[in-house]
Every structure is written in C-alpha cells, then in structure tokens.
Amino acid sequence: MTTDVTDTGLGTIRAGILGGGFMARVHRTASRDAGGELRAVATSSARGGRAAAAALGAERAEADADALLDASDIDVVHVCTPNTTHADLALRALAAGKHVVCEKPLATSAADAKHLADAAEARGLVGAVPFIYRYHPMVREARARLRRGDAGDLLTLDCSYLQDWMLLPTDDDWRAQSASGGASRAFADIGSHLCDLIEFVIGERIRSLSARTRRVFSERAGREVDTEDIVAVLVETESGALGTLLISQMAAGRKNALTLELHGSRQTLRFEQERPEELWVGAREESRLLLRDPATAEPDSARLQRVPAGHAMGYQDAFNGFMADVYATIGGAEPDGLPTFADGYRSAVLTEAVLDSAAHDGRWVQLSEQDHVERVEVQA
Ligand code: SOE
C-alpha cells in the first residue's frame, strides 16, 4: 500500500514558499511530489525573491512576505526562513487563512509556539512542522513493533544526533547568533528532531531532564557566538526509562548521524538516520538486521514505502512522505503521525527546559503533562 500523493480531496494545493535556501528547495521538491503547484516565492529582498523563484521553478516572485500572504491563489504557506522570523510569519499566514508548514523550531519561545498551536486549531487550519524523520519507514516499523510489545518494557535509551558542520572556528551560520537563530542552536536545530523522534517512537514523553551545554568558540568567522555547540542530556520518561542524549554539531566525520537505540526488556531496537533502510533488532539469543521491505512491513511503515525493497529510500523520500500527509490533511484526511504545531510547541518546551537546566548547572527539570511553559517546574 502506498500513500496517494495527489488526491487531497481539495484538488490541487497551491503553495507559496517564504525563503530561498536549502530547506526551500527540499520543500519545493516535496510539495511538487505531493501534487502541489508552486505559485509564488518571497524572500527578505525583492531581488532575492526573483532569484529564488527562478531557481525553485515558481510561477512568480512576490516582492515580500506580505504580498505572498495576501495572494488569493495560495492555500498553503511554507515558512523556510531564519528561526527568529518563524513565529511572526506563521501567525500572519494563519491570520490570512492559509495552512502553514513551518520549519523547526516553530518558535524561539514556548509561549509563541503555544500561541501558534492554539491559533491553528482555533482557525481549523493545518499547521505542520517538518519533523520528517518520523517518515522513514523503518522508524514506523520500530514504533509499530514497540507498540505491539515485541521489545518488552522500555528500560533505557541511548540516543544521539551528531553533525560536524560547525567543527572549525571558521564555520559560521545565521543559527550561531541568537538574534537570528534563537537562544538555542544545537538543541533547537537537531536536538529537537531527536526528542521528537524519541517521543514519537516510544509513545511516551520525557518526564524530566538534566542538561549541560557547551560552546566551544566564543567567536566564529569574526562574529560573536551566543549559542551552544554541544548538549548532553539525561532523561527519564513517563514509564521510568532512563536515557542519555548527546547532541553535537562538532563531531568530526558525523554528517547527519541521528541514532535511536531503545533497550526493552526483550529486545533492543536501533535506527540510524544515515542507514534508513535498516532496523537492528537486538536480542539475547539472536540479533537481526531487518531490511526495509513493503511486503513484510507493518501497515504504517508499508504505506510510506514508495519503491520496492532494495531501491534505497532516503531523506527527501521521508520529506516527501511528510508533505503527502500534510496535503492529505488539508484535504480532510487524518494520517497517523503527522507532526503538527502542537509537536512544535512540545519541542519548544523541551528546548526551554534544556536551557533552563543548563543555566542552573544541570539541575533536574520536571515537564508537566500539559506541556505548558508556565508549568515547567524547577526542582530545588
Ligand atoms: C542543519 O543542522 C540541518 O539542516 C537541520 O536544520 C535539519 O533540520 C536537519 O534535518 C539536518 O541538518
């Protein structure tokens, strides 16, 4: 079974993209794959917008974000701009009656993220955040097996997200400054994916955490840096499982190494984002490497498999699967596991908890069930 990527129930979805960088290209490709039509692009300058529209193959460039949000021929707005602009643009898009796909972090404060989640719900509009690693078929396979009880009770987690693109003092990016990236860099950028994936797969939440952060260089490429490079987190889940998370953008040789290792009382499940066709199933007697195969996969995994076994699927495929579900949701469907603004809010709460703990020498922070930032309680 595969997702029908074109029938949204609403006819063709007409998209507008804000931003013109790497993520805008990924969104464009996924939108097109989901049957969308890219009507317009806008960036922070009219000239940049024209260049981006040409590069992305959009019908037209708009002079600025306002013009794009005002356009009557756009159903969904993709926000692919620097982090600190997300909340404002996403809110304005919702106010203009558009569905929104907003890059993570949804907002740089939990309060703003909550406001957005509430606004999308109140207006009956789709608000989605591309936590796209949920869309690797072997992630869904792991989730289904855990739900079925194959692995037993969750005991521990050993998870990490490692990259190396900020290894050198000459490596710089708009995310390095809080003014454009928000107060957190490594955690908000990639720790957010890791925590989203953990909670999605294990089906329970992180109940408390203790975090330490490290900033290796106070300047990058001559500019002051006020965000973290590395985060180490101890977590406890609702069921009492204990875990360690390591997040770094300075791990030499690691490019996009998101690893989930979940130890149950019967089995261990290990997924590596750079080897998305595989799931390692560890056991006392016999460990196995499971390869993606729609013929034998769990239904929720099989539905995301567009090509037969042995025809490797990867990052863009996961993104395409996500966008197909976003557009189907706009059309009235209710696909399982779509990351919404509520998940973006959850992620912002975790980010604040991590920064809070790190600012207090790693003291444990409790996260309430309701998620509300005001209810994040700090232990003495
Ligand atoms: C850069 O760290 C980045 O592109 C992230 O922003 C993405 O969310 C992640 O998927 C890959 O790495």
Image (tube, rainbow, N blue to C red):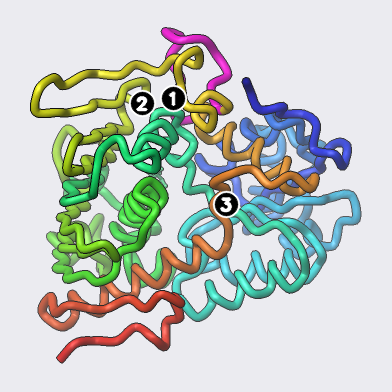
Residue pointed to by mark 2:
276
Residues at marks 2 and 1 touching, judged by CB atoms closer than 8 Å: yes
Magenta span = 304-316
Name the mark nearer the viewer: 2 or 3. Answer: 2
Q: Inspect the magenta stretch and tell me whether residue 249 lies in it.
A: no
Mark 1 residue's CB less than 8 Å from ligand 1: no
Q: Is residue 306 magenta?
A: yes
Q: What amino acid is labelled 2 in the image?
A: Pro
User: Is there a contact, CB below 8 Å, between mark 3 and mark 1?
Assistant: no
Q: Position of residue 128 (x, y in %)?
A: 61, 54
- Which of pointers 2 and 1 lies earlier in the amino acid sequence? 2
Q: Nearer the viewer, residue 13 or 306?
A: 306
Q: In the rendered structure, find residue 292 and report the number of the disc placed on it.
A: none
Q: Amino acid at mark 1?
A: Gly
Q: Image height check: is 160 above or below 360?
A: above
Task: Assign a secondary structure to mark 2.
Answer: loop
User: Of callouts 2 and 3, which one flags the residue occurring earlier in the amino acid sequence?
Assistant: 3
Q: Where residue 56 sits: x, y (%)?
A: 66, 34
Quarter holding residue 235: bottom left
Q: Is residue 311 left or right of residue 214?
A: right
Q: What residue does disc 3 label? A: 80
- For the N terminus, give its image quadrant: top right
Residue 211 visible in the displayed image: yes
Q: Quadrant of residue 269?
A: top left
Mark in the foreground, 3 or 1: 1
Disc 1 secondary structure class: loop
Instruction: Out of 140 and 229, give the one closest to the viewer.
Output: 140
Counting from the top left corner in percent of width and height, residue 11 is at 88, 37
Q: For ligand 1, tell me if the residue under mark 3 lies within 8 Å.
A: no
Q: Residue at x 46, y 77 (%)?
A: 370
Q: Quick one: quadrant of the C terminus?
A: bottom left
